[in-house]
Image (spheres, helix red, strand yellow):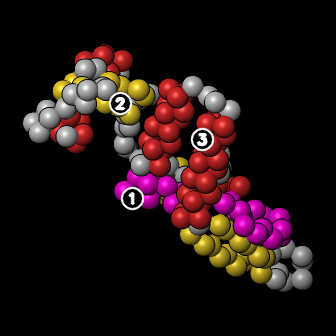
Amino acid sequence: RSIIGGREGVAAVREDGTPAPPDELPAVDTLRTGRAHDDVVRGLRAGDGSMVWLSLNSQPLGGNGDGRAHGVALSFTDVTERRTAERLASAEMRLLEMVAAETPLEDVLRRLALLVEDHCQGAVCGVMRVSEDGGRLHPLAGPSLPAAYLAAIDGAAVGARAGSCGTAVH
């Protein structure tokens, strides 16, 4: 959040997630410099905590003969779904490259778990394997789970009433 004009406002972020100062926003820059901007992507945090991505376009409105803009025409398009699809496709390609390069399975699964966590805000992902006899679970990846938790669930039983993981596999 930032304070703009004495009021609390929403802070924008660049595509890489770094803060975008208010004077860097297309409408503000267009008003100050008279330059138009096309497809400037900025993220804004929605009320529910999710990030909304917008493509911003700004055009100066003619001045009083002094060459300075007296206003700005601003348009924006919600590109959240497009950006999410592009990021997922890129992550999928990286995972396939890892498999093609014969990267160890644990590293591939770790990257996959991180991808799930990134895509599903607030989620924590773990990947388990089932023992050869089908009766026990063993963690393979859980990059955001505490090591003590992973150790505690190693060997968890599979069954109708065997906790959430064991029941899901059953």
Q: Does dot 3 land on a helix, a strand or a loop?
A: helix
Does residue 114 lie above or below 59 as drawn? above
Q: Which residues are magenta?
A: 25-54
- Which amino acid lies under the numbered mark 3 shown in the image of this protein? Leu
Name the disc covering residue 11, or none.
none
Question: In the rendered image, which residue does mark 1 sit on?
Answer: 47
Instruction: Please report the residue visible at 28 percent of the width from the left and 20 percent of the height from the top.
Output: 154
Question: In the rendered image, which residue does mark 3 sit on?
Answer: 95
Residue 79, how many percent across, how many down? Answer: 59, 66
Residue 41 inside the magenta-drawn segment: yes
Marks 1 & 2, CB-CB < 8 Å contact: no
Residue 45 inside the magenta-drawn segment: yes
What's the CA distance linking mark 2 and mark 3? 19 Å
Residue 46 in view: yes
Residue 49, how many percent across, how many down? Answer: 40, 52
Q: Does dot 2 land on a helix, a strand or a loop?
A: strand
